[in-house]
């Protein structure tokens, strides 16, 4: 089993916190990352002449610290959960990052396998008065796979036929019986992105990691969908 991960609905945190940029240099870092990715995309298009950008989309692409904020400010609220789904600079068109507390970072690392591909980047979190709240970590997952089983009743092609250039999105009820992943592709992974799946702003994690997060009492995460492995 695997889980498409999203933020939770705990009323303690739902709409109760927000992070913002407090240093103009961090805004410039995020823009530099977008500019770099666009240049890489154009270079790939020029090389392959493939309008679908398949080589570009399927590549594992580690991120760079210089493209991420070094510090963020709590603009709403006073307390942060262990799992933060969205923050400035958290994603681009081809990858997704979350922010995690130090204790969640440690837990994730205990599940890492040789097949996984992710990075952790420290970010200082400041209170509204400028004092230090603590250090959180950007969890940037860059492992890219093509793992969705095309016999899944719970997905459909976004547009056009299933011809190798297609993308998937949900179709009706989201259940493990209707959502299937190819075990030989994802079986050894803890976290990944499926390049065909929309919305792209979600990562998949193993059921083992998800259950450990629940058992450890990590806060503000949930399953957007649960997938079987076949």
Image: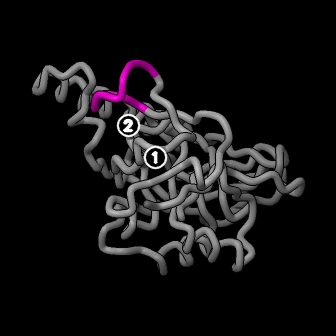
Q: Which residue is mark 1?
A: 68
Measured Cα–Cα span from mark 1 to mark 2: 8 Å
**Label 2 crowd bin: few (<14), some (14–19), many (20+), radius 10 Å:** some
Where, quadrant-wise, is the N terminus in this rendering? bottom right
Residue at 39% x, 56% y is 182
Label 1 element class: loop
Residue 46 magenta-drawn?
no
- Percent x, y of residue 55: 21, 36
**Label 1 crowd bin: few (<14), some (14–19), many (20+), radius 10 Å:** many
Q: Are marks 1 and 2 in contact (CB under 8 Å)?
A: yes
Q: Which mark is residue 191?
A: none
Pick the front one: 154 or 44 = 154
Residue at 28% x, 50% y is 60
Where, quadrant-wise, is the C terminus in this rendering? bottom left
Pick the front one: 7 or 208 = 208
Q: What segment is highlighted magenta in the picture?
A: 159-167
Relative to 6, is 229 above or below?
below
- Percent x, y of residue 110: 48, 80
Q: How is the image coloured?
A: one colour
- Percent x, y of residue 76: 81, 45
Q: Which residue is mark 2?
A: 33
Relative to 94, is 210 above or below?
below
Label 2 element class: helix
């Amino acid at each position: 089993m695997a889980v498409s991960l999203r933020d939770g609905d705990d009323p303690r945190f739902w709409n109760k916190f927000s992070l913002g940029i407090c240093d103009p240099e961090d805004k410039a870092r995020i823009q530099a990352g977008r500019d770099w990715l666009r240049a890489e995309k154009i270079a790939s298009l020029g090389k392959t002449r493939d309008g679908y950008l398949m080589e570009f989309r399927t590549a594992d692409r580690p991120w760079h610290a210089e493209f991420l904020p070094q510090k963020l400010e709590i603009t709403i609220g006073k307390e942060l959960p262990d799992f933060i789904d969205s923050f400035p600079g958290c994603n681009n068109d081809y990858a997704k990052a979350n922010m995690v507390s130090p204790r969640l970072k440690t837990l994730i690392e205990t599940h890492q396998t040789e097949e996984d591909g992710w990075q952790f980047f420290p970010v200082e979190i400041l209170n509204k008065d400028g004092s230090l709240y603590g250090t959180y970590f950007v969890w940037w997952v860059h492992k890219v796979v093509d793992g969705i089983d095309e016999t899944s009743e719970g997905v459909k092609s976004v547009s056009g036929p299933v011809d190798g250039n297609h993308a998937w999105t949900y179709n009706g009820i989201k259940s493990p019986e209707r959502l299937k992943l190819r075990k030989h592709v994802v079986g050894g992974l803890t976290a990944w992105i499926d390049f065909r799946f929309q919305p792209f702003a979600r990562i998949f994690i193993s059921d083992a990691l998800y259950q450990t997060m629940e058992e450890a009492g990590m806060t503000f995460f949930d399953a957007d969908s649960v997938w079987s492995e076949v």
